[in-house]
């Protein structure tokens, strides 16, 4: 499963994921604060991009950050240590076979994880099992179908669709953000509340032009170039035009929109 | 031009436009409040759906509500009178040949108007002329390309595309929301600030399921059924399936997303 992770495991890719977390941390995480003594499971912590934000925002809470990949966990451990944070324990493990007993955690947090899993509702059911009754889950996912822009471009839309198709072929779902409500309901959670977080970018917001449109979104699309061309999803000419057209949306008269979905629910 | 107005002029359609304005008035208009004595031009007031909200929210401001259609103006005048509002004067007129001198108004407001005009930046330039130096413009537009939903459906997307194509064929632009920033810049305004207003609907929000997804959005798409089929944009089977799939998004496990764009700027 690890080798199929659509966003890759290269150092450059890790940096992109960290850049993304830094740029978006306020919009996505400002309202996730856990009280002193709370036991929080971060499921699918990856290289720790969100872990450092969580641990910093809730310094008195105790985090257990889990990932399937030992290599990612090592990177996450280093990142957390380099920030001088001491409220995070790491654990290698699989969401579908959690190495924890029932009713173990007060809260569960997962961010950009369900999009990569073949059975996201089952994953949420597994996580619900280790949550104490009354405990909460917080889920954050993107939705690549929420991206639109000016000037519009069919090649740019096709390039994004390549990412959607490749992620789907790897058993994931890049359109999962809009589905958080039914997924959490299906997994048996109650009090499901979805809060969309739109990122709107125009040239009056240069930080988002660089930090989000170029270095997060377009960089992510560019990451599947070789696979998209190799597997025949797109030809090189259309791909290059699509990427050029995505960059055109970062110009003086361009605009770009993307929406993340954050959901909370209770066991 | 009047007969080409894509949303039609039937009484039932007028009611839809009023329902829409009522449901969305908080999200779209809560932050439009004009001070006592301000002279405000509402350009393209139509049947007065927004006029009553504007006039009620700013009871001490003086509105001049203008429309090309005498019939719409009569409906608007009746609606305003029936609400007991006395701070609105009506004027028939064309945005491209405004019946006002330069520097006449403190503020200009327009909502769901640019989407129907062939040269929206020119329209904004014309409106800028009648604005006093330092005066503001507020523009609200939808963007049908911002609509996405779960379960996804290619037929539903095709039905929405029919509306986009028909509006485009009539000289309008149903994807104009994302373009407000460059349009206002092009028209010479400064301090352009765009504020997207997303409407996210799931079954925990029954008021929006009924008031927005069904009675505003799907009703609007259904309004072009005959023209879409007659002009061959879609066949009857796909159309009916598309509409059925749109209604499916209003079920227990469905979700629906649409975004309006509100922009303000200064002369």
Image (spheres, coloured by chain):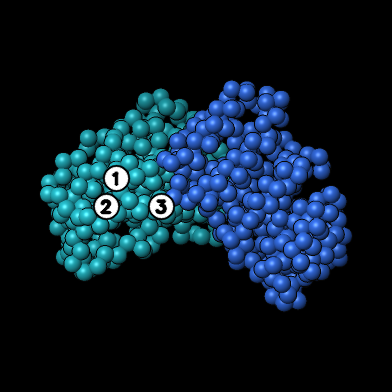
Chain colours: A cyan, B blue
Q: Is residue B84 above or below residue A65?
A: below
Observer-side mark, 1 or 3, equals: 1
Please give the residue where the numbered disc 1 appears in the rendered image.
A188
Q: Left or right: where does residue B253 sit relative to residue B257?
A: left
Q: Rate crowding at label 1 as few (under 14), some (14 to 19) or many (20 or more) other CA atoms within 10 Å.
A: some
In whole angstroms, how far apart are the C-alphas of marks 2 and 3? 16 Å
Please give the residue where the numbered disc 2 appears in the rendered image.
A267
Choose the circle earlier in sequence order: 1 or 3.
Answer: 1
- Report the disc number at residue A170: none
Q: Quadrant of the N terminus of chain B?
A: top right
Q: For mark 1, name the chain.
A: A
Q: Rate crowding at label 2 as few (under 14), some (14 to 19) or many (20 or more) other CA atoms within 10 Å.
A: some
| Callout 2 and callout 3 share a chain | yes
How far from the left and from the top, in percent, is residue B76?
78, 56
Q: Secondary structure at mark 2?
A: loop
Please give the residue where the numbered disc 3 appears in the rendered image.
A194
Q: Is residue B7 above or below residue B79?
A: above
CB under 8 Å between discs 1 and 2: yes
Choose the circle earlier in sequence order: 2 or 3.
Answer: 3
Q: For mark 3, name the chain.
A: A
């Amino acid at each position: 499963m690890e080798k199929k992770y659509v966003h890759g495991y290269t150092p450059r890719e890790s940096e992109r994921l960290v850049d993304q977390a830094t740029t978006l941390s306020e919009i996505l995480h400002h309202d996730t604060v856990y009280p002193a003594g709370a036991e929080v499971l971060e499921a699918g912590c990856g290289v720790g991009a969100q872990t450092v934000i969580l641990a910093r925002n809730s310094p008195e809470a105790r985090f257990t950050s889990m990932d399937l990949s030992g290599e990612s966990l090592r990177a996450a451990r280093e990142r957390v240590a380099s920030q001088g944070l001491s409220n995070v324990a790491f654990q290698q493990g699989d969401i579908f076979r959690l190495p924890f007993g029932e009713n173990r955690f007060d809260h569960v947090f997962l961010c950009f994880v369900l999009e990569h899993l073949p059975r996201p509702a089952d994953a949420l059911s597994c996580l619900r099992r280790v949550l104490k009754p009354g405990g909460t889950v917080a889920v954050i996912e993107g939705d690549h179908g929420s991206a639109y822009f000016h000037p519009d471009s069919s090649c740019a839309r096709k390039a994004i669709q390549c990412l959607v198709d490749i992620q789907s072929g790897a058993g994931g779902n890049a359109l999962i953000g809009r589905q958080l409500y039914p997924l959490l309901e299906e997994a048996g959670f109650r009090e499901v509340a979805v809060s969309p977080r739109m990122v709107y970018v125009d040239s009056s917001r240069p930080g988002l032009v660089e930090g989000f449109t170029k270095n997060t979104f377009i960089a992510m699309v560019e990451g599947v170039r070789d696979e998209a061309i190799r597997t025949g999803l797109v030809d090189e000419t259309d791909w290059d035009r699509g990427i050029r057209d995505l960059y055109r949306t970062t110009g003086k008269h361009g605009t770009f929109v993307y929406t993340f979905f954050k959901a909370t629910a209770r066991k």
